[in-house]
Image (cartoon, rainbow, N blue to C red):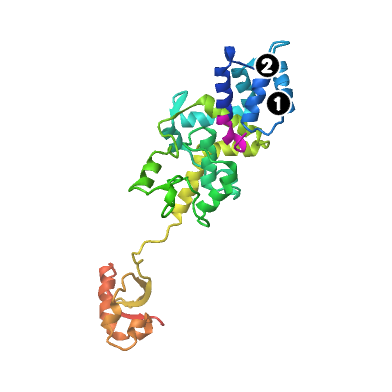
């Protein structure tokens, strides 16, 4: 197809449907089929086009037929999905269009699309922007189709290594850059804004996608993806088939969030002697600002031995607030 892979399917199908609509009884003969193939730049010679038509006529037409319905040609181009892959596509469509609907708006479809976990994106083969553009072009939702030869330049522009291409993503194409030549006439105010506003949108938000379109895209994607695991992973990842795994990963990340700025309770060991003559270690849970009661140099270094006996009355008071009663004397570490 003109665009590599499934992204080139919609214009090819549209060309054959238009040729069938213009032909008598909606059928294409060998010559009109060949001209349509050559016009779409499918990479076949005239002889190859004629051989393909004869093969299609033998498989999808009556014996000795000289013309094929355009609908039969379109079905042959789309092909058929194997049972396992078709089941995965139907499961993905059920997530995109719940309640058994056969058609969804482009906005609903875009809300479900997530290309970040596609195998080609995870491997670094394509960027997220390129993967998203390929799917939208394959579903015929892009306002302006991107030529294959400009894909590399777009990737460079998205990575901000080179400037954006002329005529895409809101940039002018017909308005001259800077001051025009004398033969071009004077520029008028707002010429760039008028040109950009008159261009097709990047995505047709008012369009709709049917299950037939969805299946047709993945049918051609299946043709260029021989590995079953990659195909199934691509379908599931793009439409939330493994959302539960993603949510579990997010939950594990949330469990590793940094601790709050609140200061944890202290754990200062104090040797307390009680009125009954017994001694034991007790834990002081609040040592905030206790060094200020010392009045000695170096007491703000968080070293207990620098606090001295000046803090003992305050330590006894705070221990009593913790519920430790009957303290006669205390001693801070080292004991």
Q: Residue at x 74, y 26 (%)?
A: 47
The reply to whether residue 12 is in sight is yes
Mark 2 or 1, closer to the camera = 1
> Which residue: 28% across, 76% down?
289
Q: Which residue is mark 1?
A: 49
| Image position of 149 (left or right of 113) | right
Q: Which residues are magenta?
A: 1-11
Where, quadrant-wise, is the N terminus in this rendering?
Answer: top right
Quarter location, residue 13: top right
What is the chief secondary structure element of the magenta stretch? helix
Residue 324 sits inside the magenta stretch = no
Q: Is residue 270 left or right of residue 96?
A: left
Left or right placement of residue 164 versus residue 293 in this view: right
Q: Residue at x 60, y 18 (%)?
A: 70
Q: Earlier in the sequence, mark 2 or mark 1?
A: 1
Apparent side of residue 94 relative to residue 307 in the rendered image (left or right): right
**9 in magenta:** yes
Indicate the secondary structure of the residue bearing disc 2: helix
Q: Residue 34, position in %: x, y?
A: 67, 24
The residue where tag 2 is placed is 60
């Amino acid at each position: 197809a003109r665009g590599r892979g499934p992204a080139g399917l919609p214009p090819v199908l549209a060309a054959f449907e238009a040729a069938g609509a213009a032909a008598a009884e909606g059928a294409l003969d060998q010559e009109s089929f060949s001209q349509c193939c050559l016009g779409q730049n499918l990479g076949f010679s005239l002889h190859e086009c004629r051989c393909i038509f004869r093969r299609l006529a033998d498989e999808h037409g009556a014996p000795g037929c000289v013309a094929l319905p355009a609908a039969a040609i379109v079905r042959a181009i789309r092909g058929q999905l194997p049972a396992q892959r078709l089941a995965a596509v139907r499961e993905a469509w059920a997530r995109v269009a719940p309640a058994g609907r056969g058609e969804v708006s482009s906005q609903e479809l875009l809300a479900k699309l997530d290309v970040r976990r596609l195998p080609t994106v995870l491997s670094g083969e394509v960027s997220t922007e390129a993967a998203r553009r390929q799917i939208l072009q394959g579903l015929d939702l892009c306002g302006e189709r991107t030529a294959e030869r400009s894909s590399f330049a777009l990737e460079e522009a998205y990575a901000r290594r080179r400037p954006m291409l002329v005529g895409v993503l809101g940039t002018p194409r017909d308005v001259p850059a800077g001051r025009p030549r004398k033969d071009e006439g004077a520029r008028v105010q707002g010429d760039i804004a008028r040109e950009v506003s008159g261009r097709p949108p990047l995505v047709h938000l008012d369009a709709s996608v049917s299950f037939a379109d969805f299946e047709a895209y993945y049918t051609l994607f299946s043709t260029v993806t021989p590995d079953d695991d990659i195909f199934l992973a691509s379908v599931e990842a793009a439409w939330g088939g493994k959302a539960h795994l993603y949510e579990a990963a997010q939950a594990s990340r949330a469990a590793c969030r940094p601790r709050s700025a609140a200061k944890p309770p202290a754990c200062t060991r104090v040797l307390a002697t009680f009125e009954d003559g017994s001694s034991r270690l007790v834990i002081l849970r609040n040592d905030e600002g206790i060094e200020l009661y010392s009045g000695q140099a170096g007491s703000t270094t968080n070293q207990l031995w620098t606090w001295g006996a000046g803090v003992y009355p305050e330590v006894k008071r705070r221990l009593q607030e913790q519920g430790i009663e009957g303290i006669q004397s205390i001693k801070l570490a080292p004991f």
